[in-house]
Amino acid sequence: MIHDVVKAVYREGYRIEVAFDDGKKGVIDFTKYLRRGGVFKRFKDMDFFRSFAINKELGILTWQNEIDIAPETLYTEATGTPLPDWAGKKKKQLTNKTVNRTATANGRR
C-alpha cells in the first residue's frame, strides 16, 4: 500500500519531517540526494530545497512541481519500514538484466 504525504515541515539543514495518511511520521535527511546529482543538484540551493510543497492530488512531496520523490520511498525512509515487495522486486530484476547484458557484451555467459 502506498501512503500519501499529508504534512511536511522543514526542520534544519536538509531535514524535513513528513507525516502520512496512516498517522505515521518521521524526519528524512535529504543530504544523500545531493550526492545523486542530476535533478537533485538543485537541492544545493537551500532556497529551492526549502520551497517544497505537497501535491495533494498525488500525495507526494514536490519541489516546484519539477522534482518529486516516490511516496513509498519517503515512507520507508521516514518510518524505517521496508519498501513494498513490488518495489524491491522490480529493482532487483532491473539489476539482474544489467548484469546479464554486461556479461554477454563482454563475451561471458
Image (cartoon, helix red, strand yellow):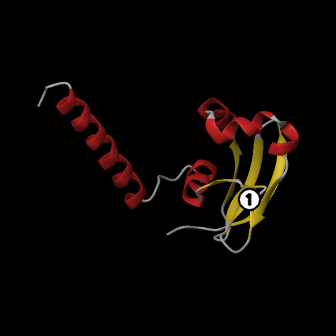
- Residue placed at 71% from the left, 58% from the top? 61
**Pick the front one: 103 or 35:** 103
100 sits to left or right of 52? left
Q: Quadrant of residue 85?
A: bottom left
Give percent across and percent down for residue 53: 80, 59
**Pick the front one: 87 or 21:** 87
**Pick the front one: 31 or 80:** 31
Pick out the residue farthest to the right: 47
Give percent across and percent down for residue 86: 38, 60
Q: Quadrant of residue 108?
A: top left
- Residue placed at 66% from the left, 62% from the top? 24
- Total marks shown come to 1
Q: Quadrant of residue 64?
A: bottom right
The local crowd at label 1, few if under 14, some if 14 to 19, many if 20 or more residues have their Cα within 10 Å, is few
Placement of the C terminus among the 4 image quadrants: top left
Q: Is residue 7 visible to us here?
A: no
90 sits to left or right of 54? left
Q: Is residue 37 visible to us here?
A: yes
Look at mark 1 in the image and give the residue it sits on.
65
Give percent across and percent down for residue 20: 67, 65
Give percent across and percent down for residue 106: 20, 24
Determine whether 108 is above or below 53 in the image. above
- Residue placed at 52% from the left, 53% from the top? 81
- Mark 1 belongs to which amino acid? Asn
